[in-house]
Amino acid sequence: MKKLLLGLTAAVAFSGAATVQAQEYSRTYKPFNEAVFYDGYNDNVFDAGLEDGILRHRNSLYAKKLTAENMDWFGLETKIKVTIGALCDNYDRIGNINIALVPKGQETYDPFEVQRIEIVRFITPFMNKNSYPDEVEYKYDANLVGYLFHDMNLRDNYDLWLEFELFGIPYAANTQIAGCADRNDVFRGSLEFTCTDEPAQNNYNTVTVPIIMKKPEYKSHNLNNYSEQGTDTIGTCTKTYKFTVPEKVADSQLVLVMSNHGANSKGEEYNRRLHLIYFNDEIISTFTPGGKSCEPYRYKNTQANGIYGQSKKNDRQWAASSNWCPGDAIPVRYFELGALEAGEYEVMIRVPEAVFNEQQGDFPVSMYFQGLKEGDLPTEVEEVTTQDVGINTYQKGNDIYAVSESPITQVSIYTYDGKFVYGSHNFNRAVSLDSFEQGIYLVNFFNAEGDVMTVKAIRK
């Protein structure tokens, strides 16, 4: 497998032949074009009678069955562009593009009764439809999508439906935005795929296994620490997901889409937390979402809001609180697993410091497994190095040293199974493990620029 980036930073009506541009070899396919979404809480499904090939499950979820011709069109060099236009929702909302695996021959389906795969996620800006810009684009490198559409193990058993999901409500805009009184249309959305290579060959080499699909915004029970469906143990933000790999694979990976939500006072949206990913009880990755400046997306937020405020913030201010930016894509994270035998496996996600103040907020999680029986899974991005993070570390005896051009502002230590054991905002060159029991620990260093470095250390 080529090098993988744990945090990928971006990240519909098919009417005939693909578009070919003369300047360079490029083909485009636009399955959703200016589709209008409506009040997500309204039971009446608007536009349901339109004969445009779109199945409207509800006002926030549209689907389109892909034909064999549609799927055969895809190559292995694929880019996705999602365009969201402002109508009468002026708040930040979650949107995503999914693939539904539907038993063959059905003309409709229940989204809660079929397996689904989320491929990209985004957050809309705070938009005033009367101000410019009145639309925003999200672009993703999505080469692995071609493997999904050419997976004949899937296509022999399922029809594949492409879903466009975008939940919105018009109630604030009804009174705050001129021209939105009594309206219930919230956004318009388009989805476009571009391939810069020839169509790939259909094959039985790919092994695709859906693991978990996030719940929609009007339901609860995504990952949290307070509901039986959202956690393994009440009081801890820990969730185990089980899945079966049906055949031996030569190379494989997990694909995770996850974002932190909770806009109440002291909510999870505003607190960056360490995330721990385990595969069969072995930790395979740690990450802390956010940490980047949201200033590049300020101009897209044409509606006044409490996230951006009236004045520009520096990088340190954004790094202290931003898990994601309104107007930006949510990272797609890839975790390399390598060769695996057929069998049962478990993935566990732990966010040990998550609070969920007043039992509000949750972490919508979507994840799937992808493997090849022969060959390596390619990726177009490079591995993050220590130098990219801006913090260098080394261990001497039981002391862990950290060097950073920007001052280290916080240190936290966890046991290997994710239990918090130490935290401090006072750091002087090194942190000692002498007072801890022998074993493996995860030590996290945070600097003033918002960089986070997690190192595995051994208490000898």
Image (spheres, grey):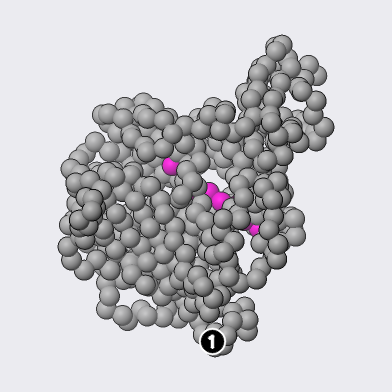
Residue 73 percent coordinates (x, y): 20, 53
On screen, residue 246 versus residue 303, left or right, reads left
Who's the residue at 63% across and 81% down the image?
Answer: 176
Quarter-of-image position of residue 403: top right
Left or right: where does residue 208 sit relative to residue 306? left
User: Residue most toward the right?
Assistant: 426
SS category of the residue bearing label 1: loop
Write down the residue under mark 1.
Answer: 179
**Where is residue 431 shown, x and y percent of the image?**
76, 23
Q: Check if residue 259 falls in the magenta segment.
A: yes
Residue toward you, 442 or 320: 320
Establish if 244 lies above or below 397. Answer: below
Residue 337 part of the magenta segment: no
Residue 177 visible (yes or no)? yes
Q: Position of residue 249 (x, y in %)?
A: 32, 30
> Is residue 45 placed above or below 104 in the rendered structure?
below
Residue 281 seen by the camera: no
Based on the displayed image, in which of its 4 quarters is residue 164 positioned? bottom left
Residue visible at 69% across and 31% down in the picture: 405
The residue at the point 41 percent across, 64 percent down is: 83
Is 91 situated above or below 353? below
Q: Is residue 429 left or right of residue 366?
A: right
Could you say which is closer to the camera, residue 341 or residue 63?
63
Residue in view at x 31 percent, y 30 percent: 376
Quarter of the image with the C terminus is top right
Q: Quadrant of the N terminus?
A: top left
Instruction: Tell me where residue 426 appears, x and y as whole percent.
Output: 82, 32
Camera-side residue of 393 and 68 = 393
Mark 1 residue type: Gly
The residue at the far front in this view is: 23
The magenta region covers 255-262
